[in-house]
Amino acid sequence: MNIRLYGYGCIGRATGRLLTEAGHTVQILDPAYIDASIRKWAVESTTPDAVVICVPGPEKNGRIDMSIVEGIIAEQLDVPIFVRTTAPVGWCRRQNRPNLVYWPSFARERYAYDDEMDENFRATRTIGVSGERAEGLSQPPVLIPMEVAIVPYEMAELAKLATNAFLAMSVSFANEMTHLCAEDSKMAGGAGMWHYVSAILRRDSRIGENAYLDANSRGWGGKCLPKDLHELINGYEPLPGGASVLRETDLVNEAVKGVRVVGQVDPLWGMFASMPSPQAPWP
């Protein structure tokens, strides 16, 4: 297939490589990246068989701004449109385009291609559709050989936002626990005690060995976690009384940026020096 790829950032590069490896011809449209390093990807402009959109959806007034994506969609012919840009819940259905498929990426920015290919991330491969048979699309509507969960738009949209919100919450939790260890006089191990406590938590199958429990004195950031969390905070009604784990996650993250929450383990805890690190397999 001839595929037109809009956007050549972290996700766009990974997607372009995946599509090319699947045997598709990829035409890249991104003024910021049209240089010698990617000319081998580009082909002469032709009517595409499908369009893949990986352009930014920046945060604007606490919400995800989809105007760049909407401008691209408005120019498209009646061909399958795959949107990888993170979208607010309900956005895809409001476009009223039965040929639109939501294909969110759950990959990390710096390791996008590796994550797309990683077994641990394959379980998150999700395609959102309108619920009707998308005109012109095969079943399932995919462009690369992979197993995916085919779900309604709203389920895929929320899955992407909720994933990043949960990861942000996990880091905020770890930072607050580390601060507690550092400040409470009863915590003989000091701030570094959390390193070992988190290893114990990971042994609980309800939490999991790969849980995000590492403290970071800079808090969490990047392009995705803040934007996606703010979309959920500002786009939807909180619980009665205004209670919100999401809001508190954001507040804790802002508070921790000015506090050093990582430290060395007190010598009293030297007897546990041989404990495996959180990433190491347990005996």
Image: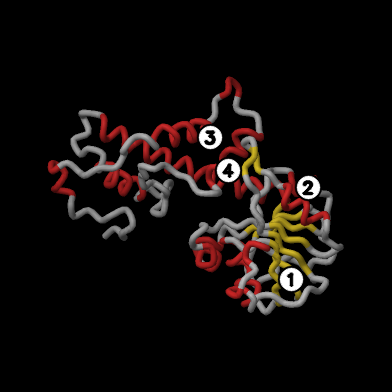
**Residue at point 76%, 74% (across, down):** 2
Q: Earlier in the sequence, mark 1 or mark 3?
A: 1
Which residue is label 1 attached to?
3
- Are circles 4 and 2 on residues that touch, CB within 8 Å? no
Q: Earlier in the sequence, mark 2 or mark 3?
A: 2
Tag shown at residue 246: 3
Q: How far apart are the two marked residues, 4 and 3, measured between alpha carbons?
A: 12 Å
Looking at the rendered structure, the secondary structure element under dot 2 is helix
Depicted 179 relative to depicted 208: above or below: above
**Residue at point 70%, 60% (across, down):** 53
Q: How far apart are the two marked residues, 1 and 3, measured between alpha carbons?
A: 38 Å
**Residue at point 60%, 49% (across, down):** 160
Which residue is label 2 attached to?
93
Q: Amino acid at mark 1?
A: Ile
Left or right placement of residue 65 versus residue 212 in this view: right
Which residue is label 4 attached to?
227
Q: Amino acid at mark 3?
A: Leu
- Percent position (x, y) of residue 99? 81, 59
- Are circles 1 and 4 on residues that touch, CB within 8 Å? no
Left or right placement of residue 113 versus residue 258 in this view: right
Q: Earlier in the sequence, mark 4 or mark 3?
A: 4
Q: Amino acid at mark 4?
A: Lys
- Residue farthest top in this picture: 241
Looking at the rendered structure, the secondary structure element under dot 1 is strand
